[in-house]
Amino acid sequence: MRDYYADSSVLVKQHIQEVGTVWFTKLAANNLIITSRISIVEVYSAFNRRVRENHLTRADYAQLVADFEALYLTEYQLIELTLPIVKQAKYLLEQYSLRAYDATQLASAIHVNLSLQPLANLIFLSAEPPLNCCPSRRVSH
């Protein structure tokens, strides 16, 4: 069993069929998934965008929300937004061209990873290109 930090772009894959859905669903079934509480808002946003774009009906939306809420309440470890995470996000925003929530997701993962040391290394999962193409060096402050 491994520890994974998943941002909302990955969490959505458990509920909406897209590239990576099968892979993440299998991974989530056998490992600890950690995410920021802000991911909840981002996933709701992703579902609502699909309703506005007529890719989901209101009934489908209601079912997806119910399924997602059941998962995040029982299966995910949620990380709260704290002052150290805000400071780390600020640092990341000053160093990299990131959106606010992306920086907050990455800062949350860094915070969790530091708390796991030296026992384990957290694996960060994202489907957001800006988060997947950052320099491959340790980011800390």
Image (cartoon, grey):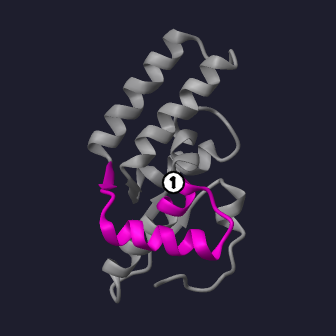
Q: Is residue 124 left or right of residue 66?
A: right
Magenta span includes 2: no
Q: Which residues are magenta?
A: 76-105
Most foreground residue, 46 or 93:
93
- Identified at 45% across, 52% down, the residue is 28
- Identified at 68% across, 73% down, the residue is 134
Q: Is residue 38 left or right of residue 12?
A: left
Q: Secondary structure at mark 1?
A: loop
Residue 132's quadrant in the figure?
Answer: bottom right
Residue 19's quadrant in the figure?
Answer: top right
Circle 1: residue type: Asp
- Identified at 47% across, 25% down, the residue is 64
Packing grade of label 1 (10 A; few <14, some 14-19, many >=20) is: many
Residue corresponding to mark 1: 7
Q: Which secondary structure dominates the residues rendered in magenta?
A: helix
- Identified at 42% across, 65% down, the residue is 108
Residue 69's quadrant in the figure?
Answer: top left
Residue placed furthest toward the bottom? 118
Across and down, in percent, residue 18 comes to: 68, 37
Q: Is residue 34 left or right of residue 45?
A: left
